Structure formats: C-alpha cells, structure tokens
C-alpha cells in the first residue's frame, strides 16, 4: 500500500490544473487541443498503439482536474471509454489497432452509444438491432444520451444481431443517422441518435457475442470509476471555494468563518470529500483484480458512495454561499449542477446500490 | 502509488488468522461476541497466548518487547482480531502506559513495569478526565505537593475505565501553576491500593460496570513514579495521541458487525421475519458495508502517510466516522432482532441453558442493547466528535 503521488503524476496534475483553468470558456476543437497536444488522448492507450500506457490512477488524477475545472470536453466519454472498450475487446482477441491508434493520436473522437429509451440496463437486452441484407447489414434503432455524440468523428453503437450483442462502427454522416444534439443541465453536450436503416458493412461490425458483453462490463466499470474521480475533483474544489468564501464574507461584524456552526459544517464537508476519495482509491485498487464481478461491484459501490457525498458537499457549498450560491454568475452552483448530471450518467446511486444488493444476494446463495 | 496489499502483507494477514484460529479460545470469542464488558480474568488466557507468541505489545519499540510491525501490519493484526471476536487486552497498559514509559520513563520505571505489563500481571486505568476537565484536558486540577521523596496527590478523577480492577493508575496531575495551564501537568503512576485512593462505580446506560470515579486524598507515591520530566505531561499525552491515530476507527469491530449480519438475517427470516422487512434491512446493510469500505480506506491512507498535512484532520475524521458507523451498525442489528432486544439481560443469563431467554430471544440477542448503547461513548471519549470537528476545521481551514 502506497498512496504517495509520483513525480510524473504530480506533473500531470499540476499541468492539467493550470491548462484547464486557462482553457475555461473554450469549446469544440479548441477545447480538445490541449488533450491532443499534451498527450492526454494517448494516456489511456498502450504504447503499441501510439499511446502513453498511462495507469488508471494517472487517468483518475487527470479526471479529477476536469471535475475541478468544470471542463466540458467529453474526454472520458469520447476518448477513455472507447479506448477501454477497444482494449477490452483486444484482450479477447478482437483487435482494432487502427481505431486505438487514431484515438491515441487525437484524430478521432468516438461517441459510445449504449443507452436506450427503455433503459435497457442489463447486458444483451438492447432493442437497437442489426438486420442482415444481401450486401451486409442495416442498423435500426435509437440511442439516447450519447455524450459528445453531436461532435464526434465516429460512433461505437451497441446493437443486437441474432440474439448476440455486437459493437458497430458508424460514421456520424452515414445515410440514415439522425443526430439530435442538446445541452445538459450543467452545459455538457449530448445527443440522441436515431438509426434509420443505416447501411453497415461487414467490416464495420467490430465484434460480436460474449466478447462485447464482457468488454462493455469491463469498460463501463472503469469509466464509472473515473467518472467518480471527476466528481471527487469537483467536490474538493467546491469545498475549497466555500472555505475561502467563509473567510471573505463578513456579517454581524465578523467573518462567517468565525461561527462554530459553519466551522463544524466545513468539517463535515471534509469528511465527505475524504471518504469519497478513499472510496475512489478502493475502486481503483479493485479494478486491478482478475474477477470481473469484483471489479463491477467495486465500481458500483464507488458510485453509490461518491454520488451521495457529492450531493452533500456541492449542495452544502451552495447553502454556505447564501444567495450568491444560487446565481449562475458565481461558480459554486455549477459544481452542484455538474454533480447532478454526473450522478445520472452511467447510473445513479440507487441503480448501483441495487446492483450491489443483487451481487450480495448472489454471493449469499 | 501502489493501491494493494503486498504479497508480504497478505501472507502476514494469513499468519495472524491461523494464529487466531489456533490460540483464541472459542468460549472467550463467543463471550466477547455477545458484547458485554469482559472482566480482566476473562481476557487473561488470550493475553497469555499473545504474550507467548510475542505479539502482546505491537506498538512498543522492538528492544522493549514490541513486534517491530509496520503500521499496515498492525492494522491487519487488529482487523483480523476484530473479525475473529478477540477481546481487547488491557488497552491502557499496553497502548498507553507502555509506549509512554518506553519513550519517557526512567530505566528504573521501565524495569519495574514493562515486563509485568507484557505478561498481563499489571492492569492500568487512565486518570485523565476530571469533573471540570473533560474535553478540555488542560484544565486538570488534581493537586500535587512534593514532600521529601514523595509526591502527595489530592484530586478527583472521573470516567475512569477499569479503575475497579486496575493495579495502577496513570494519572495526569498539576505540578505547576506557572505559565499556560497545559505547561504544568505531569504523568504520575499511582498504585490503586495506596492509602487515600477511593473508587466509586458509575452505573452507565449500557447496564454494565466499566467506569468509575476515583478520589485521591493525600495519596503519597514515591518520587520515582513521576514519568519523565516534571511538567512534561502534556507532551507525553500529545505523543500518545499522535501514535494512536487510527485506533478509534474501529475497523475490526465494524467488520465483525458486517460479517455476522447476513447470518443473523437468515435466522430471523427462518424464524418468520417478514421478507419485506428483511429486504429493507439488507439494503441498509449493503449501504453500511460501502460506508465501512470507504472508512477503511481512509484509515489505510492515514497509515500510509498519504499527505502529512492532512494527517491530523484525517485522524479526527476516522475517529468521528468510526463512532458514527458503529452506532449505525449496532442499531441495524437491533432492528433485525426486533423485540428480542427488549428484556434487560445479563451475561449470567446467557450461560444457563436450562431456562429459555425471555421474549423468545435467541442466543444472538443478549448484550446487543448493551453494546449498542456503549458505542455512544465512542463518540464522546478520546475527544468528543464536536472537538474532532473543531480540530478538522482548525487544521485545514483556519487562517
């Protein structure tokens, strides 16, 4: 057990903090620029595919900084998640080196289309389907909540063909792809995407069967954990911002920070931030285990704990700023918005607690 | 970063578990599991077993009989002991008096006390708190005067755990009124059978007897019973608190609660507990296990010295959370047992199989209310949770 941050990690963290603070307000390709130039797109990918072979802990440090900076770049969803998905497929003998390479070099941003209207949470229960035609396939269905889906270079779509899950590569400009982009409550960009008889060639079906099911579980456990890193970064920033505000703001002839009720409230916020970080480390540790069900459970448990702590911390941060906290002009409320959206993406605390309960019941039997 | 136990640490944990399986008497473990406060004589066989193994004083320097374990190994040891229902052994003697004597005591004091403490022949109580000095320890008043080769003490100590069974008290007393209040305190060892020492039991909510008031009236002890330099008591207390950062996190005890809950729920279901109630309880249990996991990793981060600037705040955080989670865990158990926990039960009732327990209570029930009520104290002793929140604020945010 060693929790000390390495020199490389410190450099990564400090650079990210500085660069992302300076990049506030940029959008689109400009916003992606530092991710390419500083090698962050290469971080989740191994050296053999032009990547830097960063660890999950490295990625967690970077994601924390995205949360802290309230960065809107869908780095996790359009770079890390597809990279993890492709890597998980590669480890099952289904290699797509060219896609991994283009992700690493920042040439492609890939939207991952999983969620559907019927909230098909369980593996293999998707209604988007791939129908065989004489010359290949047609993709039919609808995907929701594709983060970064309106501004990506390719889509990885999870669909069903012959009762098998498959992963399909679809160019966003293919005939029959209808993308409806929209903004989330916290400003991040998402899209719902309809696939109306979209022609799909044999080679665009990247993988099929249990390899896809397993790769999805594996990649989602990682993405979920790294999403928690983003939330932890946001929580800590809002806590620090609040401590600072209590020092500045004077009422009744004294600093707000001199009131014991608020001091003890800050201690409670620290405990919540501290426990969220502990849970994050625990999940990062568990992701190294061989047993996939342990990894999935650790990621779910992490989301349950971190989401609850985030609700508490970002909510209290608004409360302690008084009316100022309610304004969009001031930053603290944006952390609350970010954590509300983050909680619902990849499944909220109730969903993941139910997953933990199901695992618990399975172990008991 | 290396977010996993090393192979060496894992092997160590297995060694501890094997030892526990061999050396911890099952009857003692069963008694401990019930949650009543154990007597010194109950714990003696376990103390002997640890002493023979050379594991009785993990926190001491090795040349005084310590184990030389790293903080992570101590953690694994304590966690395994907690899960296996091993009782705590003479905590004050081994975790407080021993380390203080090793660090500050004269050779003569070490000679007199260290070996008997390790053997389990000497039991200590801690005389810190007074009626007017609870969380505010620097307000200690217990008077001293030096008469020839003796120190004569007069004072009133309170909330003194085990005073009724201890051989000695480690007493924080005022030896000077000069300077700040904390600068005039000293640690003095007092034999409990010295003339002028009077112990009065204090009955507590949990229905057990473990704390007392102690009156000191012209109690004379030899000068050499003063530990270290005169007026260095505060520094010694600080030293102790700095060393025992994570003891009050109760990871082992929390694991014990978590481990036995599914079995308890199964039995209650078999005995007719409504399945919908069981579902709710199980949900709370899973939520609690997640909270305990986070808590446990907070402790690991402290042990690994993650970031020293946050150490003090982190220690206070795990102290607060340890007590809160114990209250939660024990209350969840009460909910699962339901009305079985209504009757007042004594340890004696649990060892007579002739009579059924009242209210249809199963063997799980006695001691549960007692222990649940006792955990209220965990949020109070060692600096109340309110004091800890103050420490967190002043360490991290005060300017």
Image (cartoon, rainbow, N blue to C red):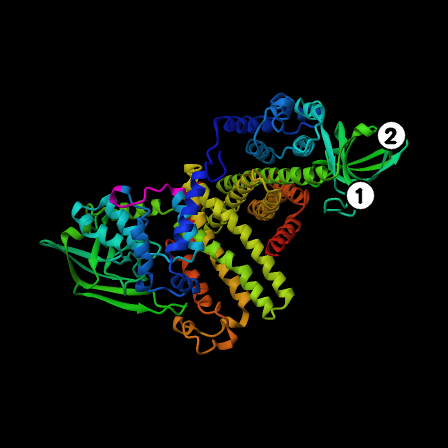
Q: Is residue A316 left or right of residue B363?
A: right
Q: Residue furthest left?
A: B148
Disc 1 is placed on an element classified as loop
Depth order, front residue of A314/B223: B223
Report the residue at 76% width, 29% height from top. A154
Q: Position of residue A180 (x, y in %)?
A: 81, 36
Query: Which of the two discs, 1 and 2, sits closer to the camera?
Result: 1
Q: Main secondary structure of the magenta part?
A: loop
* Residue placed under numbered mark 1 in the picture: A163
Q: CA distance from mark 1 to mark 2?
A: 25 Å
Residue range in magenta is B63-72
Q: Give the quadrant of the C terminus of chain B.
A: top left
The stretch drawn in magenta includes residue B67: yes
Residue A136's place in the image compared with A232, above or below, is above
Mark 1 Cα shell of 10 Å, populated few (<14), some (14-19), many (≥20): few
The stretch drawn in magenta includes residue A304: no
């Amino acid at each position: 057990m060693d929790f000390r941050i390495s020199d490389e990690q410190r450099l990564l963290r400090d650079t990210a903090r500085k660069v992302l603070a300076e990049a506030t307000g940029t959008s689109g390709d400009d916003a992606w620029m530092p991710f390419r130039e500083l090698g962050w797109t290469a971080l989740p990918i191994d050296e053999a595919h032009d990547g830097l072979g960063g660890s999950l802990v490295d990625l967690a440090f970077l994601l924390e900084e995205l949360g802290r900076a309230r960065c809107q770049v869908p780095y996790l969803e359009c770079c890390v998640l597809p990279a993890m998905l492709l890597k998980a497929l590669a480890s099952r003998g289904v290699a797509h080196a060219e896609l991994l390479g283009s992700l690493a070099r920042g040439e492609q941003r890939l939207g991952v289309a999983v969620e559907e209207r019927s909230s098909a949470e369980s593996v293999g229960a998707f209604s988007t389907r791939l129908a065989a035609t004489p010359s290949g396939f047609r993709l039919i269905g609808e995907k929701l909540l594709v983060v970064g889906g309106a501004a990506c270079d390719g889509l990885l779509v999870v669909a069903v063909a012959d009762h098998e899950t498959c992963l399909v590569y679809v160019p966003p400009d293919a005939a029959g792809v209808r993308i409806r982009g929209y903004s989330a409550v916290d400003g991040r960009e998402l899209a719902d995407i309809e696939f109306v008889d979209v022609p799909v060639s044999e080679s665009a079906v990247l993988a099929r069967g249990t390899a896809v099911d397993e790769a999805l579980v594996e990649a989602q456990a990682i993405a979920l954990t790294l999403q928690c890193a983003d939330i932890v970064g946001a929580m800590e920033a809002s806590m620090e911002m609040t401590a600072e505000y209590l020092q500045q703001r004077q009422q009744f002839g004294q600093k707000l920070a001199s009131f014991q009720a608020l001091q003890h409230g800050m201690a409670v916020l620290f405990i919540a931030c501290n426990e969220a970080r502990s849970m994050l480390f625990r999940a990062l540790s568990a992701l190294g285990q061989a047993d996939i069900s342990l990894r999935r459970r650790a990621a779910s448990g992490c989301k349950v704990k971190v989401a609850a702590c985030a609700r508490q911390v970002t909510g209290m941060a608004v409360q302690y700023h008084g009316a100022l906290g309610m304004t969009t002009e001031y930053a603290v409320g944006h952390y609350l918005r970010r954590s509300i959206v983050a909680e619902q993406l990849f499944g909220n605390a109730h969903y993941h607690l139910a997953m933990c309960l199901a695992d618990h019941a399975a172990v008991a039997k | 970063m290396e977010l996993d136990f090393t192979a060496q640490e894992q092997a160590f944990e297995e060694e501890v578990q094997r030892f526990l399986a061999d050396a911890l008497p099952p009857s003692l473990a069963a008694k401990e599991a019930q949650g009543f406060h154990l007597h010194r004589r109950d714990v003696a066989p376990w103390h002997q077993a640890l002493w023979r193994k050379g594991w009785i004083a993990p926190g001491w320097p090795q040349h005084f009989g310590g184990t030389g374990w790293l903080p992570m190994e101590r953690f694994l040891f304590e966690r395994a002991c907690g899960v296996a229902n091993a009782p705590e052994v003479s905590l004050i003697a081994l975790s407080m008096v021993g380390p203080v004597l090793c660090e500050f005591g004269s050779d003569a004091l070490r000679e007199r006390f260290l070996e008997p403490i390790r053997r389990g022949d000497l039991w200590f109580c801690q005389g810190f708190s007074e009626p007017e000095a609870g969380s505010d320890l620097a307000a200690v008043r217990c008077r001293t005067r030096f008469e020839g080769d003796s120190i004569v003490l007069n004072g009133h100590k309170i909330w003194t755990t085990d005073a009724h069974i201890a051989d000695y008290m480690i007493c924080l007393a005022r030896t000077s009124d000069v300077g700040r209040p904390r600068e005039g305190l000293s640690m003095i060892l007092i034999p409990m059978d010295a003339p002028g020492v009077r112990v009065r039991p204090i009955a507590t909510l949990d229905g057990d007897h473990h704390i007392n008031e102690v009156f000191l009236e012209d109690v004379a002890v030899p000068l050499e019973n003063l530990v270290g330099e005169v007026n260095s008591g505060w520094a010694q207390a600080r030293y102790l608190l700095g060393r025992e950062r994570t003891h009050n996190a109760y990871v082992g005890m929390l694991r014990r609660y978590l481990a036995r809950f599914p079995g308890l729920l199964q039995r209650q279901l078999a005995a007719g507990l409504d399945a919908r109630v069981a579902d709710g309880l199980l949900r709370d249990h899973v939520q609690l296990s997640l909270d305990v996991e986070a808590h446990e990793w907070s402790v690991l981060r402290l042990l690994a010295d993650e970031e020293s600037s946050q150490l003090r705040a982190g220690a206070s955080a795990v102290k607060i959370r340890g007590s809160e989670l114990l209250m939660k865990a024990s209350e969840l158990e009460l909910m699962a047992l339901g009305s079985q926990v209504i009757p007042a039960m004594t340890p004696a009732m649990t060892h007579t199989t002739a009579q059924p327990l009242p209210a249809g209570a199963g063997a799980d029930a006695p001691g549960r209310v007692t222990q649940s009520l006792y955990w209220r104290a965990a949020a109070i002793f060692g600096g109340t949770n309110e004091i800890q929140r103050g420490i967190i604020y002043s360490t991290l945010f005060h300017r």
